[in-house]
Image: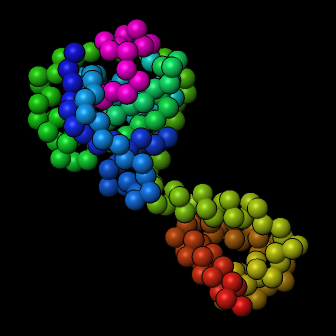
């Protein structure tokens, strides 16, 4: 069994590169953790999809371990049934150290079941968070009660006054899909301005 010593991990529901870690993330220091060398196909499945691992194929009955394909290293956290529940990238220096010694790590066979395939999203974590914020905000808005706010927001974005609240709402929904940074900026700005009034 191969082990890695003294690394930091940042387990999240989805895989995020180390440069996307946020200040409020709960980063843990791990003194000793098993590592398994797997194929590239297995690595990519573990990274993006819903996977259940047959824990009997793991040498150590650990719920936390590393996997590598020789190019990348990732931390995995599984539940008691073997389902991958969280993933973590490694900071560059620690990942680089492991990859430099990768030839010494024995190849492993990990039996697993593919529960659900996810198409990898090619947007940053910050953009994804902004998109969630916008979608939640617009989903919880009441067109009648928040008519003034919607008109104000619409004017701020398009520099146009409009009375048709359904058109305003639909245009804002479209904007939130086409230009997340712009929509996020104006939503925050208008919220702040209205709070000052």
Q: Is residue 69 magenta?
A: yes
Q: Which residues are magenta?
A: 54-73
Residue at left 84%, top 83%?
163
Give the number of callouts: 0
List x then y, in percent, for residue 60: 32, 15
Q: Which quadrant of the figure contains the N terminus? A: top left
Position of 97 relative to 77 (above/below): below
Residue 94 vs residue 59: left or right? left
Q: Nearer the viewer, residue 151 or 93?
A: 93
Residue at left 66%, top 60%?
135
Q: Nearer the viewer, residue 164 or 14?
A: 14
Residue that lies at the very extreme toward the top in this rendered image: 56
Position of 51 relative to 88 (above/below): above
Q: Which quadrant of the figure contains the C terminus? A: bottom right
Q: Is residue 44 magenta?
A: no
Residue 6 vs residue 132: left or right? left
Q: Quadrant of residue 101?
A: top left
């Amino acid at each position: 069994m191969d082990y890695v010593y003294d690394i930091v991990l940042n387990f999240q529901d989805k895989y995020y590169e180390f440069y996307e870690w946020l200040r409020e993330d709960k980063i843990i220091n791990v003194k000793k953790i098993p590592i398994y060398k797997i194929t590239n196909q297995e690595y990519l499945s573990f990274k993006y999809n819903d996977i259940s691992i047959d824990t009997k194929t793991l040498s150590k009955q650990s719920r936390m371990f590393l996997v590598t394909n020789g190019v990348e290293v990732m931390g995995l956290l599984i539940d008691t049934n073997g389902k991958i529940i969280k993933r973590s990238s490694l900071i560059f220096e620690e990942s680089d150290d492991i990859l430099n010694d990768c030839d010494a790590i024995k190849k492993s066979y990990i039996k697993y079941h593919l529960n659900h395939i996810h198409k990898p999203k090619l947007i940053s974590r910050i953009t994804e968070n902004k998109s969630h914020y916008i979608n939640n905000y617009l989903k919880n808005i009441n067109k009648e009660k928040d008519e003034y706010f919607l008109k104000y927001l619409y004017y701020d974005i398009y520099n146009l006054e409009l009375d048709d609240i359904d058109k305003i709402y639909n245009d804002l929904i479209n904007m939130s899909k086409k230009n997340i940074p712009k929509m996020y900026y104006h939503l925050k700005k208008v919220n702040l301005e209205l709070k000052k009034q």
